[in-house]
């Protein structure tokens, strides 16, 4: 039997609830029993309801780009007495008073393990490297809202409340001044600000803010004991300090010893994992017994676990279960305690509005003062202040502990819940409105391999999904012949999907020195990728490598890729094909979303694009420590894409270990006749086709000029073989390609988008991946007898005079520009042909 005390307007109601220890599981409906009278079936129903409602709200709020925490808090509020709980029948059946104890216990277990994971993921060493700006910004962003909280506490605190004014001030101040690090990270990723200076400062400041908030909350809980306050609080603080010291001096070395006992490369033993998970409970029990909340024990225990394989394993095993299933229970409990009806009267709503406006303004004001001191532009300071208003789990914990300790009454609690939801919800819309950084559209000329001068730096952006993509790309870049005269600048972009997991976000914040263990699997992958490229940089001269990370939903990842390509002024963007080779030599789809990314990149890239079908270049033999031996074939049909592939071949053949074969396909009599016949038919139907014919003639002339230039430059080069094949249709083309496919380990071919040629007639009828073009698709298909890597190249063509940027969807404009500049020097013509062929989105 237990007593449930409810306070309503200074009158205390007491509900006596009976718990029957035997009523755990039901004997079944056929015995005439109601499952909802028993605690386990009722708990299962409650948990299902909470998770389903949360997921529905996440889906509904997705178009509004709201963080998941908003959906979780709102889910709790909807289930609580504010919405569905207004129906007494619903409240009595689904959330009866007798079930609250079980629900709250499970919610706190979820919270315990979630905060343990937060501790495991948090790298305190990052704070030492955050730079000078982050610490003052974090402090200013806490002090001003804290003072506002103090002033409001006098308005909200009633003399009838048991708690002392000081404790109330501390709770309200902490609740208003915190910034939720995981929520902020998610918002920054959503707004694509993670890799910007403002994003890095915000992440660093939020991390510092988070840790300070935990310290303040520990003080708040210690002082919330009302009896024998002074003496008890001192003992609580001393015991807490002793516990932290014990964890650092005793527990951390023990865990380290346990990790060292695990042989390198082997999984952490089940026994070790069980021991750690039990340790979470023990630490929670100790801190609860001391007099601060059990979550502190779990959080401190998580902090002392060293980064490395153990941390990775714990996060992988626990995160989805804890944050997906148990954590929403905590928000549901918060919602069940939230009675929006308690905010009654215009005066109270006015206080709520005032709290939101002033707390928000306070954080912005505090942040702006510091940013102005550091000469950061005003609009960036305001944006930073807005971002620091992100609320989430930590604020909900603060106000829940306050409610449990009777520091906050129903009205104050409801006001604080509303403040958390509204302050976080307004961030993305307002930041989107005010923060519009001037895109640095500085025109640059070398957007293609063909237009890159032989004596200038060749800049390449390489996109990587997994470490599996790395070896072939490194071999390709090594074959691209970096020299002192023409070094290669490589930008390595690791593509990470933005999911609901907070662990994926920490990779961005990682500016760790090499050698520090990874925080999670995503970061471990990133480390492998970066290490491989840094190793390549050290062993091969004239190469510079800059690693970057793009964290984004797959649907908008192409924006990040194109933005980096633009900012870094690259000439070629290499991205992996969406299929990978299986053990038996076939091709399987790794992730269908990768294909969409590739299609979007092809449609929007500000430079030339190469899609790499990776079947390995590892079959090659190394001649020396820094030399490779490859047999590369370029298939030339004509058009801007093929000229780009040929120009890349021209660069590659300068490598002493490369043998280059160029096979040019020329139309036979039957193919020429078919073209003329099609042309006559089109001309009769559409007089305007004359322009296209003229354009095709110019294309042919450009092809001839470029091939002649290529042959002149390679005339005395024994490593280059030039072959011409006359073919009439697709079958003869395939037969010609098959004569050389066994002797080569890389094919380079133009995408040929938009060019209709009788030489590839019939090949597109059974095309699996039209984005590769007819020949690229043929070489990449699983039916291909030999396994050869393929690089399908699309030339960037959206340039006119002054290299102005043209959008891919304005063919008319591009065609007009093409005719305006068709009488310029050949190099300009080579860069500016046939943009309308690439204007169609894939």
Image (cartoon, rainbow, N blue to C red):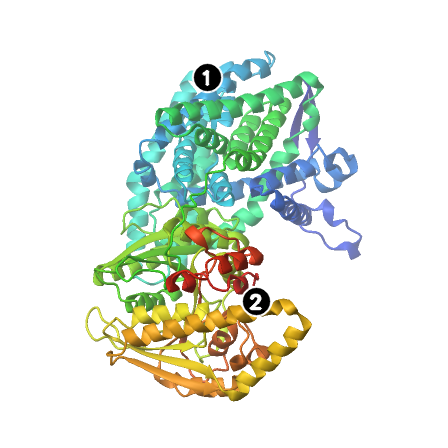
Q: Position of residue 245 (x, y in %)?
A: 31, 35
Q: Residue at x 35, y 24 (%)?
A: 373
Residue reaching furthest to the front: 823
Q: Nearer the viewer, residue 786 or 573?
A: 573
Q: Indicate the quadrant containing the N terminus: top left, top right, bottom left or bottom right.
A: top right
Would residue 407 be visible to someone looking at this image?
A: no
In the picture shown, does residue 289 fall above or below 51?
A: above
Q: Secondary structure at mark 1?
A: loop
Q: Indicate the quadrant containing the C terminus: top left, top right, bottom left or bottom right.
A: bottom right
Q: Residue at x 51, y 71 (%)?
A: 696
Crowd class of label 1 (few under 14; some 14 to 19; many from 20; radius 10 Å): few
Q: Secondary structure at mark 2?
A: helix
Q: In which quadrant of the rendered view does residue 285 lie?
A: top left
- Marks 2 and 1, the one that precedes in the sequence: 1
In the picture shown, does residue 391 fall above or below 143?
A: below
Q: Position of residue 565 (x, y in %)?
A: 41, 53
Crowd class of label 2 (few under 14; some 14 to 19; many from 20; radius 10 Å): few
Q: In which quadrant of the rendered view does residue 478 lie?
A: bottom left
In the picture, measured across the screen, residue 473 lies left or right of residue 655, that is: right
Residue position for label 2: 691
In the picture, measured across the screen, residue 52 lies left or right of residue 826, that is: right
Q: Position of residue 187 (x, y in %)?
A: 51, 41
Residue position for label 1: 228
Q: Nearer the viewer, residue 473 or 416?
A: 473
């Amino acid at each position: 039997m237990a007593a449930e005390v409810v306070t309503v307007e200074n009158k205390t109601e007491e509900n006596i609830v009976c718990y029957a220890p035997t009523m755990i599981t039901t004997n079944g409906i056929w015995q005439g029993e109601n499952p909802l009278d028993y605690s386990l079936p009722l708990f299962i129903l409650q948990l299902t309801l909470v998770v389903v409602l949360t997921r529905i709200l996440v889906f509904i709020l997705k178009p509004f780009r709201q963080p998941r925490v908003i959906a979780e808090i709102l889910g709790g509020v909807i289930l609580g007495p504010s919405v569905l709980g207004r129906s007494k029948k619903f409240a009595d059946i689904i959330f009866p008073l007798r079930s609250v104890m079980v629900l709250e216990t499970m919610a706190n277990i979820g919270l315990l393990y979630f905060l343990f994971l937060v501790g495991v993921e948090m790298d305190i060493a990052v704070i030492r490297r955050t730079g000078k700006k982050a610490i003052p910004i974090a402090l200013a962003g806490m002090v001003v809202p804290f003072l506002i909280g103090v002033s409001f506490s006098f308005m909200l605190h009633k003399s009838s409340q048991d708690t002392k004014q000081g404790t109330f001030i501390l709770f309200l101040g902490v609740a208003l001044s915190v910034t939720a690090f995981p929520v902020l990270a998610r918002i920054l990723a959503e707004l694509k600000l993670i890799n910007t200076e403002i994003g890095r400062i915000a992440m660093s400041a939020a991390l510092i803010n988070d840790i300070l908030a935990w310290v303040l909350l520990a003080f708040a809980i210690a002082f919330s004991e009302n009896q024998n306050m002074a003496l008890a609080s001192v003992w609580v603080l001393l015991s807490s300090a002793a516990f932290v010291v014990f964890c650092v001096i005793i527990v951390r070395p023990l865990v380290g010893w346990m990790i060292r006992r695990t042989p390198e490369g082997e999984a952490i033993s089940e026994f070790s994992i069980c021991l750690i998970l039990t340790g979470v409970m023990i630490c929670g029990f100790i801190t609860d017994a001391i007099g601060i909340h059990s979550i502190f024990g779990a959080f401190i225990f998580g902090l002392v676990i060293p980064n490395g394989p153990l941390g990775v394993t714990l996060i992988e095993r626990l995160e989805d279960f804890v944050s997906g299933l148990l954590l929403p229970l905590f928000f549901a409990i918060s919602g069940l305690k939230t009675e929006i009806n308690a905010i009654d009267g215009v005066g109270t709503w006015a206080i709520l509005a005032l709290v939101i406006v002033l707390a928000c303004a306070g954080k912005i004001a505090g942040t702006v003062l510091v940013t102005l001191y550091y000469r950061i532009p005003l609009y960036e300071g305001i944006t930073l202040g807005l971002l620091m208003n992100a609320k989430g789990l930590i604020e909900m914990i603060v106000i829940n502990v306050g409610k449990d300790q009777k520091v906050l009454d129903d009205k104050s609690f409801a006001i604080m819940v509303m403040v958390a939801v509204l302050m976080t919800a307004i961030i993305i819309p307002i930041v989107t409105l005010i923060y519009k950084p001037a895109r640095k559209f500085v025109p640059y000329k070398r957007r293609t391999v063909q237009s890159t001068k032989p004596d200038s730096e060749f800049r390449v952006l390489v996109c990587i999904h997994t470490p599996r993509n790395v070896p072939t790309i490194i071999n390709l870049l090594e074959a691209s012949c970096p020299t002192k005269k023409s070094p290669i600048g490589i930008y390595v972009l690791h593509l990470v999907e933005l999911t609901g997991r907070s662990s994926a976000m920490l990779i961005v914040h990682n500016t760790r020195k090499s050698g520090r263990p990874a925080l999670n699997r995503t970061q471990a992958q990133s480390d492998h990728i970066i290490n491989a490229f840094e190793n390549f940089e050290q062993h091969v001269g004239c190469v510079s490598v800059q690693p970057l990370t793009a964290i984004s939903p797959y649907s908008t990842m192409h924006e990040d890729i194109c933005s980096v390509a633009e900012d870094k002024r690259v000439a070629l963007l290499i991205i992996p094909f969406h299929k990978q080779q299986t053990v038996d030599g076939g091709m399987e789809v790794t992730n269908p979303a990768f294909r969409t990314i590739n299609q979007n990149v092809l449609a929007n890239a500000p430079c030339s694009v190469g899609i790499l079908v990776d079947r390995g270049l590892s079959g090659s033999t190394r001649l020396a420590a820094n030399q490779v031996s490859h047999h590369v074939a370029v298939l030339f049909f004509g058009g801007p894409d093929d000229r780009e592939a040929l120009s890349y071949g021209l660069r590659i053949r300068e490598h002493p270990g490369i043998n280059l074969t160029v096979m040019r396909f020329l139309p036979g009599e039957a193919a020429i006749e078919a073209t003329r016949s099609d042309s006559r038919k089109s001309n009769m139907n559409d007089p305007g086709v004359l322009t296209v014919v003229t354009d095709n003639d110019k294309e042919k002339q450009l092809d001839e000029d470029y091939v002649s230039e290529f042959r002149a430059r390679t005339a005395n080069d024994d490593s280059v073989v030039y072959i011409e094949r006359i073919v009439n249709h697709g079958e003869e083309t395939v037969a010609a390609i098959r004569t050389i496919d066994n002797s080569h380990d890389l094919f380079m071919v133009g995408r040929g988008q938009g060019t209709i040629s009788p030489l590839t007639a019939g090949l597109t009828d059974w095309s699996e991946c039209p984005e590769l073009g007819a020949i690229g698709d043929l070489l990449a298909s699983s039916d291909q007898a030999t396994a050869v890597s393929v690089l399908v190249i699309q030339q960037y063509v959206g340039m006119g005079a002054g290299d102005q940027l043209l959008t891919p969807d304005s063919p008319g404009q591009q065609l007009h520009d093409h005719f305006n500049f068709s009488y310029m020097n050949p190099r300009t013509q080579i860069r500016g042909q046939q943009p309308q062929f690439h204007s169609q989105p894939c």
